Amino acid sequence: MHIDSLSIKSNIGNYSVNVCGDNAFIKEISGLANAIFIIDENVWNFHKDSSLFSLKDCDKIILPINEEKKNLETVQNLYSQIMERSPKRNLNIVSIGGGIVQDLTGFVASTLYRGVNWIYIPTTLLAQADSCIGAKTSLNFESFKNLIGTFYPPAEIYIYSEFLKTLNEQDYYSGVGEIAKLQLIAGKPHALEFINSLDKVDQIDSEIILRLIKGCLNIKKDFIENDEFDTGRRNLLNFGHCFGHAIESSTNFLIPHGQAVTLGTIAANITAKQKGYLDETEEKFIREKILLPIFKTKNNINFNYEKIIAAMMKDKKNTGQGLALIMMDNNYQMFKITDLSKQEAIETLKEMEKILGSLL
Ligand SMILES: NC(=O)c1ccc[n+]([C@@H]2O[C@H](COP(=O)([O-])OP(=O)(O)OC[C@H]3O[C@@H](n4cnc5c(N)ncnc54)[C@H](O)[C@@H]3O)[C@@H](O)[C@H]2O)c1
Ligand SMILES: [Zn+2]
């Protein structure tokens, strides 16, 4: 049963997100002709006897993944496994998993025969609330995060909140990190509402989570429909990602993506405060009421300034003389600068380390 749906306009082909109340949609998709299901190994192990039961006899590739495998080598393996099946151009790829499976299979779907039909079932909170729309597919190359990619949306997306129940704490709060970022981008009333719902978020309350997922997809829809190819306003969705990506790659992906984004958001706000765009009270309020409560990473993070700055310098968003950074002001308006100096970034990291203290 579909309880809701959202259509997204795209230059490549409009697509829709279906929010499902039960797993009847999986049974329906299991009957699709010429389909190959590419499923995250963890998701398959957790859900093969429940939500995914009807896929038992379907043609499947069960994929073990991690951030280090989000590369061309895995893509080539997938091409081989698909071609062994002598597929036709009317092949349907159905992928089931989080953002990594989305990026890998989206890239495969967009390049095989220059594009085959692709259906995506996101299973992490991050993928359901954020990455499933926007049409980006990204691969890492050497130490460059998301360097290679295409724009290619799935034809259909199905959201089923039952999958979220098996996420571990870090991966769940990784999704909450991207949700918090989008709520801040949407403005102060959204941010305040998010603070009020945090207790329910901690309890993984399905109703609140679904409401937040739909809210986030609507916020992102506005940015991607008006700038799908990321040449202007869509850049602002990278709030939290400039320091975030750098922290993520400089710590060898020890921190899940959305948790790195939470640190990146704290860092962006500290810079905005240091440069006079954001009041001290507002920076502290956002940090203490939104960002720190959702930072649940317990790994001992090696916070190496030089490595973080070196990674920031490799960011593909850099176009000017200095480092690129998206920040917010007191009115929760996002803006981009391209001339952040190394020294300013170091000042931010120093203050952040002091504030976070024992968390790092
Ligand atoms: N293409 C885009 O627009 C876009 C946007 C944001 C992020 N991303 C990318 O997405 C990736 C992060 O995605 P993610 O946070 O979804 O992580 P992920 O795909 O790495 O999944 C996180 C972990 O959860 C497991 N998992 C997935 N679903 C599960 C479930 N239902 N139950 C239990 N375990 C489950 C996975 O096996 C993995 O170990 C990053 O590579 C990031 O760059 C892409
Ligand atoms: Zn992200």
Image (spheres, helix red, strand yellow):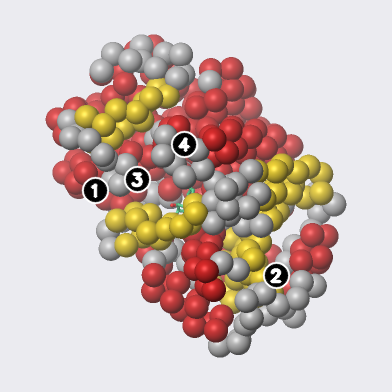
The residue tagged 2 is 48
Q: Residue at x 66, y 71 (%)?
A: 92
Q: Residue at x 46, y 13 (%)?
A: 331
Q: Within 10 Å of the Cα at label 1, are there few (<14), some (14-19), or many (20+) other Cα atoms?
A: some
**CA distance for labels 2 and 4:** 37 Å
Q: What element carries label 1?
A: loop
First along the sequence among labels 1 and 3: 3
Position in image of residue 286 (x %, y %): 45, 21
Depth-wise, is mark 3 or mark 2 nearer the camera?
3
Given the image, on which type of amino acid does mark 2 rest?
Lys
Q: Nearer the viewer, residue 128 or 153?
A: 153
Position in image of residue 56 (x %, y %): 74, 77
With respect to residue 340, does 285 lie above or below? above
The numbered dot on residue 234 is 4
Q: Do the residues labelled 4 and 3 touch (CB within 8 Å)?
A: no
**CA distance for labels 1 and 2:** 40 Å
Given the image, on which type of amino acid does mark 4 rest?
Arg
Q: Is mark 4 on a helix, strand or loop?
A: helix
Q: Is mark 3 on a helix, strand or loop?
A: helix
The numbered dot on residue 245 is 3
Ligand 1 lies under 8 Å from the Cβ of mark 4: no
Tell which residue pokes out farthest to the front in this image: 11
Position in image of residue 39 (x %, y %): 60, 68
Depth-wise, is mark 1 or mark 2 nearer the camera?
1
Q: Within 10 Å of the Cα at label 3, are there few (<14), some (14-19), or many (20+) other Cα atoms?
A: many
* Res. 91 visible in picture: yes
